[in-house]
Amino acid sequence: MDAFFLESKDPLFGIIIFFVLIFVITFFSYWLSKYKKKEDYKHLDRFLQQFQTLPSQNELKVLIAKGELSEKSWFLLANAYAKSGNYEKSIEIYSELLKVGDKANYRDTMFLLGKTYFKAGFLERSRQIFLEILKNNPRTPQALSYLLLTYERVRDYKAAMEVLEPLEELGRDTTVERAYLEALLVLNSAKLSSEEKVEELLRIYKSSHALTHLVFEYLFRVNPKVAWENFDASKAEELIDVLWCVDKKDLNLEVIMQNGYLRELYSAKGYIEVANRSSIFELDVLINLDAKANATLGFEYICNNCKVVFPFAFHRCSSCHAIDTSRAEIALVKDYHKDFSEENNSFQ
């Protein structure tokens, strides 16, 4: 019977015991790690279940105070709420972090709160927060930028222009922003007549060499004659949506006939018949249709800076806040205006 067992002093016995111990340790380590991972997942599930329905303000206070989630994670969560349009929850998180969060992040949290208030449309609250930041940290360009935007939103353009001075001291080129705010001051002035506004806008345009769309959109609407007199043919493509909407009676044929792009554009519109084709597909189709089909040009607008697409024209991008970066993209669409006119005529 003893032949079936190894003596304890046998070297082979020690090797077997060694490998058995390794196996036992590995076995228990594997299952222990698996168990811990399972428990971690359960803990995470319990935490996430709290957000399947939006927590109340009191619940948020308790969750933040517990410290189960890092402050960085709360910032990410608040940002996610803001991106989804739930500004209320984002504001609640930032407000609570200001009370119990790390004081080293206090200024950043204040800025994010002010920015969220701005996006949510609480402009007075955002203004107060940015002023509070600047009171203690005057050399904060991000706060200055948003303070300028806040003043612009409430149409306090003079206050917005005052913000340009500290931005210039911090090394920012504000040439375009200054011209833009001056133009807005002119357009929104109740004291200036239309003629005076036209003169001021042309002065700003010629001195800044910017704001082409903003200036000529107003000029073609108020005084097409002056618009054509100051029109730069090299800017025709930038103003395609404005030029497309000019009435036939307001055309300056002398200017149009000297520019190939304008000849193609108004031939496609059906106002003149001087171009029989175009290198631009949409214009070429409309020229060859010769008003036989109910089609016209439609426009959408792309910001050259951030590439966000908008269905309407803009002078300051609402996404990245860049000025004078709008680019009109054209497409063939059904002419509903023509349909409406034909329906009205049929009742007469």
Image: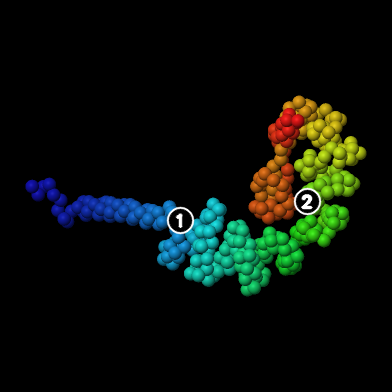
> Which one is in front, 102 or 272?
272
> Which one is in front, 346 or 245?
346
Q: Is residue 203 above or below residue 159?
A: above
| The label number, if any, that marks residue 226 in the structure image | none
Tell me which amino acid carries mark 1: Leu
- Location of the C terminus by quadrant is top right
Q: From the image, tell me which residue sits under label 1.
A: 54
Mark 2, Cα crowd under 10 Å, few <14 / some 14-19 / many 20+, is some
Q: How many marks?
A: 2
The residue lying at 67 percent from left, 64 percent from top is 147
Q: Could you say where residue 219 lies in the image, as x and y percent from the top left?
A: 83, 49
Tell me which amino acid carries mark 2: Leu
Callout 2–callout 1 Cβ contact below 8 Å: no
| For residue 347, side relative to residue 78 (left or right) | right
Q: Farthest residue in the right direction? A: 254
Query: What colouring does the structure picture have?
Result: rainbow
Q: Secondary structure at mark 2?
A: helix
Q: Farthest residue in the left direction? A: 1
Q: Using the numbered discs, state the Cα–Cα distance from disc 2 to disc 1 in whole angstroms.
A: 43 Å
Q: Is residue 70 visible to the viewer in this orientation of the structure?
A: no
Q: Could you say where residue 180 lies in the image, as x and y percent from the top left?
A: 77, 57
Q: Could you say where residue 150 lies in the image, as x and y percent from the top left?
A: 67, 62
Q: Is residue 287 visible to the viewer in this orientation of the structure?
A: yes
Question: Of label 2 and label 1, which has the lower sequence position?
Answer: 1
The residue lying at 61 percent from left, 65 percent from top is 125
The residue lying at 77 percent from left, 58 percent from top is 188
> Which one is in front, 76 or 188?
188
The residue lying at 71 percent from left, 34 percent from top is 340
Q: Could you say where residue 22 lies in the image, as x and y percent from the top left?
A: 27, 53
Q: From the image, tell me which residue sits under label 2.
A: 214
Q: Residue 110 sits in which quadrant?
A: bottom right
Q: Secondary structure at mark 1?
A: loop
